[in-house]
Structures are given as C-alpha cells and as structure tokens.
Image (cartoon, rainbow, N blue to C red):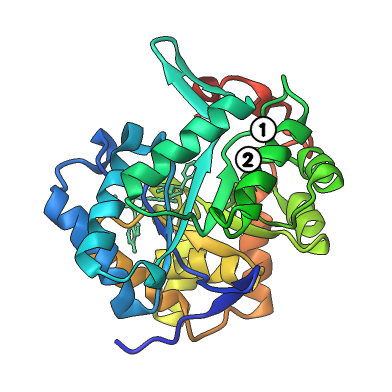
Amino acid sequence: MLVCMEYFTLNGAQVSRIGLGTWAIGGSEWGAVSEVDAIATCLAIFDHGINLIDTAPIYGFGRSEELIGKAMRQHGRREDFYIATKAGLEWNDRGVFSNSDPARLRQEFEDSLRRLGTDYADLYQIHWPDTTLPVERAAEVLRELYDAGRIRAVGVSNFSINHVRKALEVSPLPIVTNQVEFHPLLNQRELLEYCHSRGVIITAYSPLGRGELLRDARITKIADKYGKTPAQVLLRWALQKGMIVIPKASSEPHLRDNLGALGWELDEEDMATIEAMNENKRIIDPDFAEWNLPYEQIA
Ligand code: NAP
C-alpha cells in the first residue's frame, strides 16, 4: 500500500504525524512479543514514512529505550529517527511518582542517552507535571541541555491548560508539544484549542481509546461508510484536528493498518458525530486536578 505520510516541522525537524508509541515494548503489556519482533517493528517504520518513536524511561523500566537503541544500531543512521523521550517520573517500591527535581532530571537524561546509545534526544518531554516544585526548576535543566546541543526540542506531557500556561510563561525555549490522552471519549476540546493557539502541538496518546473504541458501534458504522477500519477512522479524526498521534502498534500489520488513516478525509458530519461522543462521558476539568495525584493512582 502506497501512503503519503504527513509531517509537521518541530523546531526545524520534520516529524511524521503518525508515530510509534512504545509504552509496552519490553514490558509485560506487550505480551509475548519477542525482542526480535519489537526491533523489527521499530525498523519497519521507515517503510511507511514514519520517523517518530515515542518512549520514556518508565516504559519497561528502561527496556523500551534499550530496544530502540538496538534498533538504531541495527539501522545504522541515527539521524533517520526522531526520538521523543521523557523525564520526571520516578519509580520505587511504593509506585510511580512525579519528580522533576533538577538533579533527578539530569540523571534521567544521562541514563536515557546511555540506554538509547545516542548523544542527543530529538524531543525531551516532562512526562508529568510535578506540582511540588516550581516549573522554572525543570525549565532551567532543559535550557542547559538545549544550549549544549543535547536536546533539540522541548515538550511536556499530561499538562493541563494551567500547567501549559505557566510553563510557557517561564520557559526560555518554545514548548513544541503536549502529549496527552486524546480520543473521542474524552472532552479535551479546550486544551486542544488553547495549546494550538499557543503553537503547542497536541500529541495524542491512547488515540484508539486503549483499544476500547475499536469495538464502538458508532465508529464501526463510520468506518464501513468509508471502507476503512475503526483504527483508521479514530486516527483520521485526530489528524484532522491538527494532532500528532502515537498509537501503540505491537506488530507490523497494526502499524500498516494505522497508516490507512492517511490520504483521505472524514466529512464534517462524521467529524461532528465523533466529536459528540464525549457527551456525558469523562469530562475532564481544564485544570486536570486528578493529574496531580501520584501517577499510579491515575494510570
Ligand atoms: P492505544 O494506542 O489507544 O490502543 C492500543 C490498543 O489498540 C492495543 O490493544 C493495540 O493492539 C490496538 N491496536 C493498535 N493498532 C490497531 C489496529 N490498527 N487495529 C486494531 N487494533 C489496533 O493505547 P495505548 O497503548 O494506551 O497508547 C499508545 C501509546 O501512547 C503508548 O505506547 C505510549 O507511547 C503512549 N502513552 C503515553 C502516556 C503518557 O503519560 N505520556 C500514557 C499512556 C500511553 P496490539 O497491542 O495488538 O498492537
């Protein structure tokens, strides 16, 4: 299947609007997928015009970054990949918590680069807001890394409107993306509008509603109308709303199927039908108060 990837330019770099989400790589959630298959999926992205791979230290507790590092070594050309990783989540025996303490961020960065086997990250994202520390402290670390050429762009993740507003006020660098859960069952309209009005692209994680939406009768009906799959409809909806999407695709067939979100358009009526699905569903307050809880209580 020949598809034409859509790209955004983030701080001068071309980034595919469909990326590979690698939360489950190396972790139990990826089931029985072997290391060989995980690396093969990371390398298959180039057959489809994808260059964005999203990862984080917490994914498989370092394993996701290690496997991506292996894939990059097998491929041979680091510059072909756009690697988005993260910092600011600490894990210990009690669970997983936000921690953007500068010393920890510096250590996390060195650990990530070692696991990835590279000397820079294309995009470095604060994984979760740490409301116990002024965001200025994290911004200083990111500035140091950026000035040293070790990160090429800065992003955030799970930031509410108020968190983004504050971060934009204090950050000496542009914030290019805010990675949040985004699919039709959530009402994130205000967040999307605010971020896009400030030049911050939304990267949608769990864009397939963690798989739940793939069986929704309303999505299936729209998919049948266009001769598409439910995954393609959900991704198309997010792409038409101006986002980058990072569906989890643990196998090449899913990766290929997701590419079928490109090269066609949902009409206005169907966009509106999907948009209306969040009514009476989880309406999240723009301040996302629940995101201030330790990660484990939310995920
Ligand atoms: P998701 O992408 O909405 O859904 C994943 C589910 O959909 C899996 O069961 C997957 O099956 C299935 N799937 C994927 N493509 C499909 C297709 N074409 N046809 C049918 N089924 C398909 O949910 P997610 O895994 O929660 O999120 C994706 C990524 O978002 C993660 O990998 C991670 O990188 C990122 N994320 C970020 C955060 C954060 O805090 N920043 C939090 C959560 C997730 P298979 O497993 O068989 O492929």
The spot of residue 214 in percent (x, y) is: 40, 56
Q: Name the residue under label 1.
A: 129
Gap between marks 1 and 2, in whole Å?
Answer: 7 Å
Q: How crowded is mark 1: few (under 14 residues within 10 Å), some or many (20 or more)?
A: many
Please say whether residue 10 is visible from this viewpoint.
yes
Q: What element carries label 2?
A: loop
Q: Which amino acid does label 2 sit on?
A: Asn
Outermost bottom residue: 2
Height in image: 154 above or below 236?
Answer: above
Height in image: 228 above or below 112?
Answer: below
Query: Is the CB atom of the residue marked by disc 2 within 8 angstroms of ligand 1's nearest atom?
Result: yes
Give the residue at x 57% y 38%: 127
Label 1 with label 2: CB-CB less than 8 Å: yes
Q: What residue type is labelled 1?
A: Pro
Q: Residues within 10 Å of mark 2 (few under 14, many from 20)?
A: some
Give the residue at x 51% y 43%: 86
Q: What element carries label 1?
A: loop
What is the quadrant of the N terminus in the image?
A: bottom left
Give the residue at x 14% y 43%: 32
Question: Can you tell which mark lies on residue 158?
Answer: 2
Query: Nearer the observer, disc 1 or disc 2?
Result: 1
The spot of residue 193 in percent (x, y) is: 79, 59
**Disc on the earlier residue, 1 or 2:** 1
